[in-house]
Amino acid sequence: MYVSYIKVETNHLEFLPPVMTVIDFRYCDDKNKFCNKTGKPLIEFKCKWYNSKLKTFSEEFLNIDLLFIVDFPSVLEDYAAKIDGNSYNLIKMKKYIMLEDSGEINVKYTLAQVESILHKHYYYEVLTSDLLKGKKNSVLIGSKIMSIEPNILWGPTYPDYKNKSYFNRINDYDFKENEYYFISYTDKAKRFSKRVVKIRDIFFVIENREALYESLGWADDEISGNDSIKKEFVSGTNLFFINSMTRENVSISKEKNGEEISVSRSFINNKNVVVLLETNCLLKNGLIRHFRLDGISEVRMINNGVRLLENGVIIDEKE
């Protein structure tokens, strides 16, 4: 007994977009050669490629929007050189992060370190460690990325081991509104995280007024005239905005940009006072989040963060 069968050969290239060579072009419409909206030419490319199914070369006119330019030798070298480096790279995001209650301000660029390069047919992807999202990410390699040296990217830090100020308190760190910071934070539930935030406001809350007055020597009626003025000012509400700080004093107000009074820096360092940051948190897609200052163990300012993350402009102030 004989059994007949047909042998079928399937080439994996039949399921993948082929690599083509452009050999000619033509306008889609000789009367309307350019797009009215974009101004780009309305053309089709005549492409030639090896047809694995027919075992020969095929030619066809295809719209320019269907084609992806494969030109990666120099770009690959640029990415490969960054794998072993410590520098972060500025990469434009596919989906922008809109900052909540900011007048439609968008973060358009992220900071990432290159970890490896992946080959997928004629595509190359780079695996990165994304600082803003706090996770691994894959990016299609299409153009060169901009590298930022650490001395240009990072501003003042806490703890500052370089300048031997690591014994300072986090309250002594000079946060600035509308600037971006990379913080290490532990919440009340002991959950640790790292995230990039943009400072909106800095304020503090009096948690225990009686204990605060006792520690400041304000519990008795017989206090100095200056302390009496400060005590009267902080009475009636528990929340105050911090408008500015020096090494010795802090300017505070009951309302944002309202009437101010100056208190000593030790006032906000008191254990009965909790300092908080109101921020747009990029780890939470730009939503407003609050962080207790005493929960921050590390912080690094991102120099020129607005220009960098919102506009994609690298500024070297030393040049």
Image: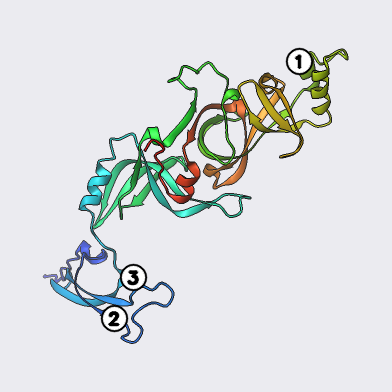
Out of 134 and 189, give the one closest to the viewer: 134
Q: Comparing marks 1 and 2, which lies closer to the viewer?
A: 1
Q: Residue furthest front?
A: 319
Picture coordinates of residue 192, whole percent (x, y) = 53, 30
Image quarter of residue 48: bottom left
Q: Residue at x 68, y 23 (%)?
A: 268
Number of marks:
3
Identity, as a three-letter code, of the amino acid under mark 3? Asp
Report the side of 109 relative to 125 (left or right). Answer: right
Image quarter where the N terminus lies is: bottom left
| Crowding at mark 2 (Cα within 10 Å: few <14, some 14-19, many 20+) | some
Picture coordinates of residue 135, whole percent (x, y) = 43, 41
Q: Residue at x 30, y 54 (%)?
A: 143
Report the side of 281 relative to 73 (left or right). Answer: right
In this rendering, the answer to whether 214 lies above or below 239 is above
Which residue in the structure is indicated by mark 2?
27
In this rendering, the answer to whether 247 lies above or below 178 is above
Identity, as a three-letter code, of the amino acid under mark 1? Leu
Q: Residue furthest bottom?
A: 31
Which residue in the structure is indicated by mark 1?
216
* Mark 2, secondary structure of its residue: strand
Q: Earlier in the sequence, mark 1 or mark 2?
A: 2
The residues tagged by marks 2 and 3 sit, at their Cα atoms, a distance apart of: 13 Å
In this rendering, the answer to whether 262 lies above or below 42 is above
Q: Earlier in the sequence, mark 1 or mark 3?
A: 3
Which residue in the structure is indicated by mark 3?
65
Q: Earlier in the sequence, mark 2 or mark 3?
A: 2
* Mark 1, secondary structure of its residue: helix
Report the side of 168 relative to 145 (left or right). Answer: right
| Crowding at mark 3 (Cα within 10 Å: few <14, some 14-19, many 20+) | few
Picture coordinates of residue 150, whole percent (x, y) = 38, 33
Report the side of 88 relative to 14 (left or right). Answer: right
